[in-house]
């Protein structure tokens, strides 16, 4: 399980603004607009309590602070509790939180205490990055390459299948790849038969996972995976629209999904 670092989260407001301009160029909507369309909901100043969690590897510098910036950016009224863990949860509820956000090393959840809805970051992140990719205004076909079919990639790929896209899947874990291809009824992408895509969705914890031979001119790579799926050199060479941001887009997807 890859953990975020404080460095990944530096200048989260600027990272969000940059991601928002890219999402606007790619889809014609900003991140809020995509979330609203996708989930059919709009926030109405729901109070969000962010609870730092000390278990496992402990508190990540900038994590709760970034969630505070992100929630306010998307129109929620939020606060970080002074206390962590169970005391923090108690504090959040006592101070009027309607949605709780908290994460340990394995699970990052949003829980709406009013309607009981609960969301997990991984599928929510996969679905929203896949949704953004699927809305690419300049896509040349409904063919999508998905690289990485784990906890984030699998639900993203399933979402693209449900939307009627022709999904080509690739994962370096051959057994997982074959099982997923069969479970989702997608096409196994074989690097021995190279071709180019105008829509690519990547969700791996590795760098440079999208090879040059699949990248078409002005394609979109929608990727929550950290570190980056392609080099800056390839991004510039092919005019790639890169949708990549470390925490905010996935968190927005979680929050909208529990409204
Ligand atoms: P996971 O371990 O469940 O899945 C990753 C998959 O990628 C695995 O199936 C693995 O076999 C595959 N893989 C690894 N290297 C590969 C390569 N070179 N080529 C093809 N496939 C490869 O991880 P996950 O929970 O799905 O997370 C994926 C990434 O997304 C991580 O970097 C995680 O930190 C990141 N993430 C980002 C956000 C965000 O908001 N940006 C949110 C959640 C997760
Ligand atoms: O409260 C804190 O500061 C920490 N307990 C936050 C831990 C954040 N957890 C992760 O980054 C894990 N990878 C789980 C979340 C999966 C989504 N990336
Ligand atoms: Mg994100």
Image (cartoon, rainbow, N blue to C red):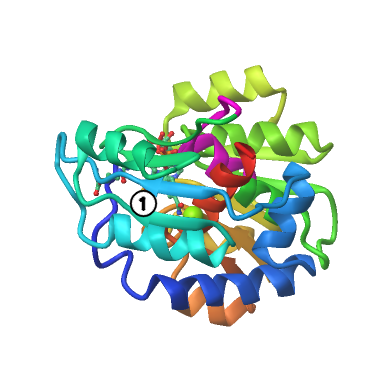
The quadrant the C terminus occupies is: top right
Q: Nearer the viewer, residue 223 or 31?
A: 31
Tell me if residue 52 comes above or below residue 246 in the rendering. Answer: above
The residue labelled by disc 1 is 206
Q: Tell me where residue 180 sits by quadrant.
A: top right
What element does badge 1 sit on?
Answer: loop
Q: Left or right: 101 with respect to 216?
A: left
User: Which region shows up in magenta?
Assistant: 115-127
The image position of residue 127, as x and y in percent, is 63, 41
The image position of residue 16, as x and y in percent, is 51, 70
Q: Nearer the viewer, residue 134 or 217?
A: 134
Residue for point 63% across, 25% down: 181
Label 1 within 8 A of ligand 1 by Cβ? yes
Total tally of numbered discs in the picture: 1
The image position of residue 172, as x and y in percent, is 43, 37
Q: Nearer the viewer, residue 13 or 240?
A: 13
The image position of residue 28, as x and y in percent, is 79, 69
Tell me if residue 26 comes above or below residue 63 in the rendering. Answer: below
């Amino acid at each position: 399980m890859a953990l975020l670092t404080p460095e990944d989260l530096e200048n989260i407001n600027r990272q969000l603004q940059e991601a928002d301009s890219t999402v606007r160029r790619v889809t014609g909507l900003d991140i809020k607009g995509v979330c609203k369309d996708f989930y059919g909901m709009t926030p109405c100043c729901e109070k969000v309590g962010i609870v730092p969690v000390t278990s496992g590897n402990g508190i990540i510098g900038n994590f709760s602070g970034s969630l505070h910036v992100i929630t306010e950016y998307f129109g929620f009224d939020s606060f970080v509790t002074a206390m962590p863990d169970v005391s923090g949860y108690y504090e959040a509820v006592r101070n009027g939180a309607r949605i709780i956000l908290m994460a340990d090393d394995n699970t990052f959840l949003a829980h709406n205490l009013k309607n009981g809805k609960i969301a997990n970051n991984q599928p929510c992140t996969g679905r929203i990055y896949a949704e953004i990719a699927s809305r690419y205004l300049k896509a040349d076909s409904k063919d999508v390459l998905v690289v990485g079919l784990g906890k984030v990639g699998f639900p993203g790929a399933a979402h693209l299948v449900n939307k009627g896209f022709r999904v080509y899947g690739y994962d370096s874990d051959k057994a997982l790849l074959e099982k997923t291809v069969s479970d989702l009824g997608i096409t196994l992408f074989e690097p021995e038969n190279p071709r180019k895509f105008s829509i690519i969705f990547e969700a791996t914890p590795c760098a440079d996972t999208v090879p040059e031979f699949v990248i078409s001119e002005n394609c979109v790579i929608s990727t929550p995976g950290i570190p980056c799926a392609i080099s800056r050199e390839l991004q510039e060479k092919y005019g790639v629209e890169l949708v990549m941001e470390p925490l905010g887009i996935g968190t927005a997807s979680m929050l909208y999904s529990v409204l």
